[in-house]
Amino acid sequence: MWTGAPTGTMHAMTHDQVRTIEWAPVSSAQYQQWLAPVRARLVRRRDPADSAAEATVDRALGTLLPDGPDTPGEHLLLARVGAEVVGQAWLGLDGRGALVRDLAGEELLPALERYAAGIGADAIKISMFEPDRYPGAPGYRVVNTQMRRALTDADDAGPRRELREMTADQWAAFRANQESDYAAEMLRAGQCATAAEAAARAERELAELLPAGRDTPDQRFLMGYAGGEPVGFLWYCVDPGSAFVLDLLVYEPHRRRGHAAGMLRAMHDRCRTAGLATIGLSVFGFNDGARALYDALGYRPVEQVLVKSLR
């Protein structure tokens, strides 16, 4: 056991105290006490409509921490000022980058940056959630924003586009371009340092998302039509109670004609009919046009991923 706040809250600290923070690894004996507030925060960040939030978080924790505090590449930490534990953090390493998976208290962020640089990380990423933001984090830029929309009828007026399931030929063309397109977007957004890293990550993530290709359960691959002509495509997945847009594209000759909004409204209708309560999506930080579209359609930010160079 340690002194401090088991719920993960921080004591108020002076600037001088923050500078004296030292990080200590979580021991096996301390692991369950460290884990409890982490799990609580992760559950709280899930979609309120997700009735399986606790089970989803437990699966994720089991996947990310199969060996608990001894899991390679995962740094489970306690922040100490002298003998007192004043907070905790969870830092994951991915190549030369560090990802803040959990942090109890924004005052800890500068100290965690110093720790990440000390173990060889070139950059650090953090997620800002609506319930617990990290104000005053200089040097960070937005990589992407997670957004969510409730599926209500009252605020979903506007024209629709016809959606049809992709044919085999359409699916083949769609899949052939996914890896290169996704890699290029991650590289532009700063999520990967090199083209090779982006290509490898795109290949790995798409293989994990689509182990059975077009027949992967709970994946929806649709073409959007206007006047009988295909104008773009929409890919989304379905979880209990919610859907998540994985890709939306309007072909170049058909842009700026309202097709993206029309395809999304038609998707809203499908999801509403299926009994889903919310839809989520992710937009890269550089994509101002897409962000404006999602804002106009009633999507609201629930999480931002930011990155800062440590070199």
Image: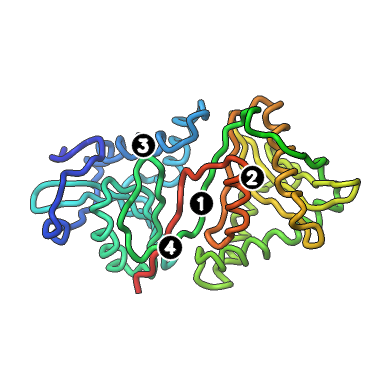
Q: Which residue is mark 3?
A: 39
> Which of the marked residues, 3 or 2, is nearer the chain's N terminus?
3
Comparing labels 3 and 2, the label whose residue is closer to the camera:
2
Q: Residue furthest right?
A: 228
Name the residue located 13 percent from the left edge and 54 percent from the top edge.
14
Label 4 and label 2: CA atoms lie apart by 23 Å
Calculate the distance from the C-alpha at mark 3 to the C-alpha at mark 2. 26 Å
Amino acid type for the residue under numbered disc 4: Arg
Foreground: disc 3 or disc 4: 4
- Quick check: 196 left or right of 10? right
Q: Amino acid at mark 2?
A: Val
Q: Quadrant of residue 141?
A: bottom left
Q: Position of residue 266 (x, y in %)?
A: 74, 37
Classify mark 1: helix, strand or loop.
Answer: strand
How many angstroms separate mark 4 from mark 1 (CA)?
11 Å
Q: Residue at 57% across / 53% down in the picture?
A: 283
The residue labelled by disc 2 is 245
Which residue is pictured at 80% across the width and 47% down the height?
Answer: 223
Q: Position of residue 61 (x, y in %)?
A: 42, 41
Residue under pointer 1: 145
